[in-house]
Amino acid sequence: MASIIEASAALRKRKNLKRGINFTLMVVGESGCGRSTFVNTLCGQQVVDVSTTVMLPTDSSTQIDLQLREETVELEDDEGVKIQLNIIDTPGFGDSLDNSQNFNVISDYIRHQYDEILLEESRVRRNPRFKDGRVHCCLYLINPTGHGLKETDVELMKTLGPLVNVIPVISKADSLTPAELKLNKKLIMEDIDFYHLPIYNFPFEESDISDEDYETNMHLRSLMPFSIIGSNEVYDLSDGTIIRGRQYPWGTLDVEDSTISDFVQLRNTLLISHLHDLKDYTHEILYERYRTEALSGDVPSQNGRGVHSGNEQSTSSPVASGRSFQAAETDSLQSSSKQAAGNQDTYLAREEQIRLEEERLKAFEERVQQELLMKRQELLQREQELREIEERIERETKLKGEMGSFQ
Ligand SMILES: Nc1nc2c(ncn2[C@@H]2O[C@H](COP(=O)(O)OP(=O)(O)OP(=O)(O)O)[C@@H](O)[C@H]2O)c(=O)[nH]1
Ligand SMILES: [Mg+2]
């Protein structure tokens, strides 16, 4: 029996090696909080600014400057396992006075990926080239203020937490002394508990976890929120070692030094130890819940109104997550059996799915139209400016000519 399991595990590994594991990571945080630097540090290469694709146009009507950008990087671990890492960056986040519109752009994107899967699942013929775009983890970078959370942080985590695995992270940890960092972490966790923010806190089923995994998860919980230091520079030290670090007048720090930040722990968590857990939680709990709600007609409307309240996951405080995992699972199982009650239901559910997709496409079309309109207006303005410049030059030339003939 054991040999069969080993053989199938080896087979799976070989398959994974060949195909590569797909993982989608979203990085959210205020402008300048260090998102790009973190992405480059995580990947050990300069990935930002390369093949940047704007996925959603700016919504000019509401003055949101947020855009979602995707970069894809192929990483390979020590054992040769390939990871296709899709990184979704959110430039412009936190720049508007009213950030709620930004939250909606992000949550709409996440929901749209779920809708795509829902639609694909209901097709008679599957599309062999279908790309699963679900976001498996959302890192929320918090500026190192030394205080607890701001209102925006609370609202964002409340909005996104029920949809995606949100992991809060203090960026630029080198700006704080060890004591300040410790206090900052404590205050943030107190706020997360106080507001019952549904973050990903390494949930597990108590009956089904090895001692080792239990220790790991508890340790990771104790580090939350993770702290990171990022850098785009690599230095050759006098002893021949090469480090990615930050150079200061008083010395050079190594971003991988785990005594000053949790960067290495976070990287291991995302790319090695919890890569599959994050994917599984997305599929089995978050997507399943979304699917159940969508099929039972209890779909949150566009633009985040009536979002899945966040309360469902609100029990997942760092202490109670084992229970919340089970509770969520039971909920989804019950709802699944309800959903299987007859063809009529299925038919209505399909109708609902189609309606949902139509709504999303309509919203997307509207955004594109608005973007087009804005570009047209810009063009007209530029033309006007050009005309004015031409007229001025003409006037000046004429004046010069008149002056010349006068002399
Ligand atoms: N001290 C310190 N500075 C950092 C760290 N990470 C990034 N920075 C600096 O912070 C500034 C902004 O970093 P970016 O990575 O461009 O931040 P961003 O969030 O991508 O910024 P936008 O894309 O403009 O919103 C740069 O000057 C970085 O060098 C860090 O860990 N510590
Ligand atoms: Mg950036």
Image (tube, rainbow, N blue to C red):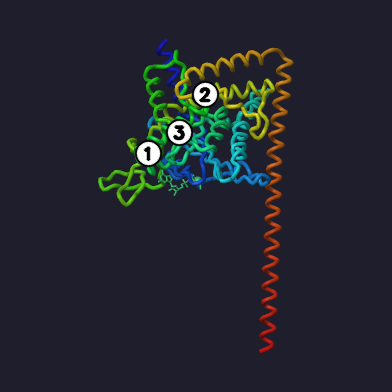
User: Horizontal and vertical percent for residue 1?
Assistant: 42, 10
Kindly report the distance in space between the C-alpha atoms of the residues bearing marks 1 and 2: 33 Å
- The amino acid on which the numbered mark 1 sits, given as a three-letter code, is Glu
- The amino acid on which the numbered mark 3 sits, given as a three-letter code, is Ile
Kindly report the distance in space between the C-alpha atoms of the residues bearing marks 1 and 3: 12 Å
Above or below: residue 315 compared with residue 73: above
| Residue topped by disc 1 | 180
Query: Where residue 281 is drawn, which disc sits there?
Result: 2
Between disc 2 and disc 3, whose residue precedes?
Answer: 3
What secondary structure is marked by label 3? helix
Q: Which of the 4 image quarters holds residue 161?
A: top right
Between disc 1 and disc 2, whose residue precedes?
Answer: 1
| Residue topped by disc 3 | 188
Question: Which residue is depicted at the point 71% across and 23% down?
Answer: 350
In what quadrant of the picture does the C terminus appear? bottom right
List the single residue furthest toward the top.
Answer: 1
User: Horizontal and vertical percent for residue 210?
Assistant: 39, 17
Beta carbon at label 3 within 8 Å of ligand 1:
no
Kindly report the distance in space between the C-alpha atoms of the residues bearing marks 2 and 3: 24 Å
Question: Which residue is depicted at the point 59% across and 22% down?
Answer: 288
**Crowding at mark 2 (Cα within 10 Å: few <14, some 14-19, many 20+):** many
Question: Which residue is depicted at the point 37% across and 21% down?
Answer: 215
What secondary structure is marked by label 1? helix
List the single residue furthest toward the bottom.
Answer: 407
Marks 2,3: beta carbons within 8 A = no
Query: Where residue 5 is drawn, which disc sits there?
Result: none
Question: Which residue is depicted at the point 73% across and 20% down?
Answer: 348
Marks 1,3: beta carbons within 8 A = no
Q: On the rendered structure, is 120 left or right of 241?
A: right
What secondary structure is marked by label 2? helix
